[in-house]
Amino acid sequence: MTHSDGSTHRHTQPIPVHPDNPSSYASAAYGSRSRQSEWARQPVRRDNIAIRFLRGLAGACAAGLVVLTAMVALVNHFAADWGIAGPGTEALWWHLIGASLAVFGQVAADRTRGLRSIFWSVAVFTIVTVVLFTQWWS
């Protein structure tokens, strides 16, 4: 059914077109940044270079622990086939729990700013250090 204005839908309303930028009509009509609060439009403040470096280093440590955990799991799985004594189930669990906590801490560090980010980065370093010390260096 066609209405007098040429539309086929009953509740169709014209979509506003900005005179300076006609391609922006869809985003303005469907709730883009123009309808967000002023707080949401503020640019995100970045941490200084030292905090970003600390977060990056903690991320590298967490990623390294994940790779190390994968290697421990592979060696543990194939140890019997290779005829060697594997690391054992206890060491595997230490690595799995430590890697999970380190990744959780790194995600938290990436999603926060300032002192909270430093706290989570230090937590990641602590977790990685505890796993390495208790499973490799002791």
Image (spheres, rainbow, N blue to C red):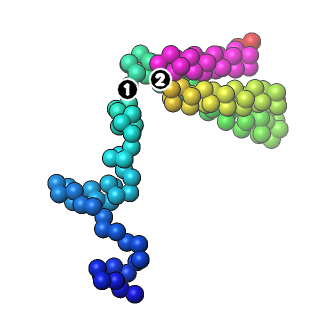
Is residue 57 rendered magenta in the image? no
- For label 2, the residue is 113
Residue 9, position in %: x, y? 40, 77
The residue located at (82%, 35%) in the rendering is 83
Task: Report the amino acid beneath label 2.
Answer: Arg
| In-front residue for pair 72/32 | 32
The residue located at (67%, 28%) in the rendering is 101
Which label is found at residue 136?
Answer: none
Which label is found at residue 45?
Answer: 1
Quadrant of residue 20 within the rendered picture: bottom left
The residue located at (41%, 16%) in the rendering is 50
Quadrant location of the N terminus? bottom left
Residue 56, position in %: x, y? 47, 25
| In-front residue for pair 109/135 | 109
Task: Report the amino acid beneath label 1.
Answer: Arg
Cα separation, mark 2 vs mark 1, equals: 9 Å
Left or right, 138 with reference to 39: right
Q: What stretch is highlighted in magenta?
A: 113-135
Quadrant location of the C terminus? top right
Residues at circles 2 and 1 in contact by the CB criterion of under 8 Å = yes
